[in-house]
Image (tube, rainbow, N blue to C red):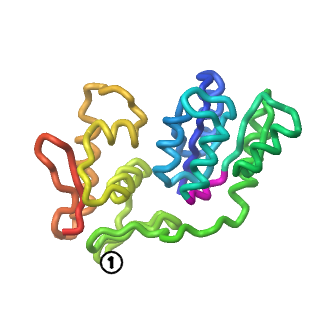
């Protein structure tokens, strides 16, 4: 399974440079341009690692990582910064960063450091499995089963299903899906959500089970326990 990486960086050129490099290495990459957006994505869960800029609009990197750790999120974080002083690096590490890299940097070193973080044994999540009725999603093995039947999903379908399961019994709007899964903060006027939901439904209900994803007229979709 591809590793999922979140990049929180306000400089577009730097963000795209990092995203392009990791995408070419086979990572599934999500991006955020400010601290508040970054925290929203980070607390959504499901990332294997986060590359975090220190100086961000909206919410600075230190505050973001403190909020993550306070919420119990243990996702490895590499902090990027133009501040090279030792005491600034110490602040970052004490706030909860796992590694620190000073700008300017080479992508090769950034990649090697992220790979090193991912090789470290991570503490398991309290509940690494998301469930709904007869469906189970294992976040560690990225395996999905329904009534014992294994379901093969694309990375995007896995993201959509995880997004639903983390909001079980709540209505998920089209806008929430566009922002949370596709990182679109505008409506692209396409049927991309509907097409993916339709495909995901076929995968989930292939065995003749009761449909899991309900349409809530005029509001969006929902997965519920009953």
Residue 190 occupies which quadrant of the picture? top left
Which of 47/64 is in front?
A: 64
Residue 183 occupies which quadrant of the picture? top left
Which of 187/94 is in front?
A: 94
Residue 13: x %, y % from top left: 63, 21
Residue 226: x %, y % from top left: 18, 69
Q: Residue furthest left?
A: 217
What residue appears at the point 52 percent right and 70 percent down from the top-left corner? 126
Residue 60 occupies which quadrant of the picture? top right
Instruction: Determine crowd level at label 1: few under 14, some 14-19, many 20+ residues with C-alpha closer than 10 A.
Output: few
Side (left or right) of 149 relative to 110? left
Counting labels gives: 1
Residue linked to disc 1: 148
Residue 39: x %, y % from top left: 52, 42
What residue appears at the point 67 percent right and 40 percent down from the top-left corner? 62
Residue 195: x %, y % from top left: 25, 42
Q: Secondary structure at mark 1?
A: loop
Q: Residue furthest right?
A: 86
The span picked out in magenta is 72-76
Q: Does 188 appear above or below 175?
A: above
Q: Is residue 75 magenta?
A: yes
Q: Does 94 appear above or below 60?
A: below
């Amino acid at each position: 399974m591809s590793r999922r990486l979140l990049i929180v960086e306000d400089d577009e050129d730097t963000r795209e440079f990092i995203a392009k490099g990791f995408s070419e290495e086979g990572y599934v990459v999500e991006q955020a341009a400010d601290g508040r957006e970054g925290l929203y994505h980070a607390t959504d869960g499901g990332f294997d690692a986060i590359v975090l800029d220190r100086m961000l609009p909206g919410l600075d990197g230190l505050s973001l990582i403190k909020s993550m750790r306070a919420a119990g999120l243990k996702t490895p974080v590499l902090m990027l910064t133009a501040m090279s002083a030792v005491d600034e690096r110490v602040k970052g590490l004490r706030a909860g960063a796992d590694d620190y890299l000073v700008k300017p940097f080479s992508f090769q070193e950034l990649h090697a450091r992220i790979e090193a973080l991912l090789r470290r044994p991570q503490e398991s999540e309290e509940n690494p499995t998301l469930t709904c009725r007869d469906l189970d999603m294992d976040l560690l093995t990225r395996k999905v089963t329904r009534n014992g039947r294994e379901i093969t999903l694309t990375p995007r379908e896995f993201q959509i299903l995880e997004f639903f399961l983390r909001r079980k019994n709540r209505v998920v709007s089209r806008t929430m899906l566009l922002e949370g899964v596709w990182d679109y903060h505008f409506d692209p006027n396409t049927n991309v959500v509907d097409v993916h939901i339709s495909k995901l439904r076929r995968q989930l209900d292939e065995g003749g089970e009761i449909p899991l994803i309900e349409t809530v007229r005029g509001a969006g979709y929902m997965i519920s326990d009953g």
